């Protein structure tokens, strides 16, 4: 889809936007005033019963319980998510030649996300923390524009401006 004029157009670069949630990831390609969704994937929760592996034994009027401890699914889900994330990012990296990457992810995923980014000739321009998985691509581009504006530094006085322009 065509990018609104007020948003970054990516005329001189091919950008990959990665938007990740806890179990979901979206990938967008932005270049030459257009943005398109490349891929979306979601890892489904496994359907376990709450008491899997649990049994009880009755002795007289007394019930005794035994069995395995409830295992949290969180680690399993994280490993499945990052396995799929790694596969998709490698596939996308082979198919497209990106020069820059913008990453949107929740803060608790920060360490893991950095580990699974592909190695290459691109530059990670911005890491934006938050849950943006449901946001429209234009809102993502508006966030990128905000980040770019924060990085632009304007001199405080006119004298400094003159010195900076002098060569």
Image: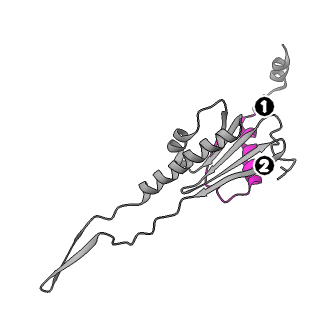
Q: Which residue sits at x=75%, y=48%?
A: 141
Give the extent of the magenta segment.
Answer: 127-155
**Label 2 to label 1: alpha-carbon separation:** 30 Å
Q: Position of residue 45 (x, y in %)?
A: 49, 64
Reading the image, the residue beneath label 2 is 35
Snapshot colouring: one colour
Q: Which of 35/89 is in front? A: 89
* Residue 109 visible from this viewpoint: yes
Which structural element holds mark 1? loop
Callout 2: 10 Å neighbours few (<14), some, many (20+)? many
Reading the image, the residue beneath label 1 is 154
Q: Which residue sits at x=71%, y=49%?
A: 28
Quadrant in which residue 147 is drawn? top right
Left or right side of 124 for 2: right
Quarter of the image that includes the C terminus: top right
Q: Which residue sits at x=70%, y=58%?
A: 135
Among all residues in the image, which is located at the extreme bottom? 61
């Amino acid at each position: 889809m065509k990018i609104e004029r007020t948003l970054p157009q990516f005329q001189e670069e091919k950008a990959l936007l990665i938007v990740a949630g806890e179990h979901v990831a979206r990938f967008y390609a932005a270049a030459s005033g257009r943005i398109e969704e490349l891929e979306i994937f979601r890892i489904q929760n496994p359907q376990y019963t709450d008491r899997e592996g649990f049994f009880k034994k009755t002795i007289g009027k007394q019930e005794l319980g035994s069995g395995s401890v409830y295992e949290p699914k969180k680690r399993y889900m994280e490993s499945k998510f990052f396995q799929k994330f790694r596969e998709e990012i490698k596939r996308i990296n082979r198919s497209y030649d990106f020069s820059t990457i913008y990453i949107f992810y929740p803060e608790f995923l920060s360490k893991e996300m950095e580990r699974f980014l592909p190695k290459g000739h691109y530059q990670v321009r911005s890491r934006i923390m938050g849950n943006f998985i449901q946001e429209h691509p234009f809102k993502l581009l508006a966030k990128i524009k905000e980040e770019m504006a924060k990085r632009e530094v304007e001199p405080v006085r006119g004298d400094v401006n003159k010195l900076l322009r002098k060569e």
